[in-house]
Amino acid sequence: MSRILKPPAPLDLATDERAVFLAGSIEMGAAGPWQAAVERALADLPVVILNPRRDEWDASWEQSISNPQFRGQVEWELDGQQRADVIAMHFDPATKAPITLLELGLFAASGKVVACCPPGYWRRGNVEVVCCRYGVPLVNDLADLIAAVRERLTG
């Protein structure tokens, strides 16, 4: 019942469609395929899953605003998070996830974020303080993140 959108697909959502954005660790394979696990776990819900893990990512792209592919990716992610009803944010301890930290800063006060930051993540303390300050639910593992996101979407 869920529908999955990935970049560069347009973010074509009806105004009444609920959406969840999967923000979190990727780092070119250093993180496990956590997005796929969330997609499977939410497959029965009438929701649009916005997964930024682009199938044809090219690591050689210059990370510059002047690069249209890179800029399009970043703008898709920002637009998706703005449009989403829930932002599921996962900090994998095997990664640094600097963009996820940036996104936590951008969206912590939105009321949309549910964060997963297992012990061992290199900046867990920073994540804990930001989540505490802005009332962001913080869990320690992916199963609890999925449960919290389901609750937000169905509760």
Image (tube, rainbow, N blue to C red):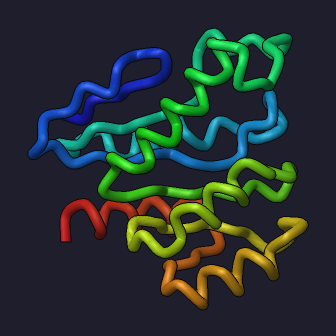
- Residue drawn at the location 59% of the way across and 90% of the way down: 133
Residue 46 screen position, x and y as percent: 17, 42
Quarter placement of the N terminus: top left
Along the viewing direction, whichever of 47 and 78 lies nearer the viewer: 78
Residue 150 position (above or below residue 23): below
Residue 88: percent from left, percent from top:
49, 56
Locate residue 14: give its quadrant: top left
49 or 112: nearer the eye?
112
Quadrant assignment, res 93? bottom right
Which residue is nearer to you in this view: 102 or 120? 102
Expressed as whole percent of the image width and height from the top left, the position of residue 103 reads 62, 56
Apparent side of residue 119 relative to residue 154 in the rendered image (left or right): right
Q: Is residue 77 above or below residue 129?
A: above
Question: Please, which residue is most extreme toward the front here?
Answer: 66
The quarter of the picture where the C terminus appears is: bottom left
Residue 20 drawn at (x, y percent) = 36, 48
The answer to whether 110 appears left or right of 24 in the picture is: left
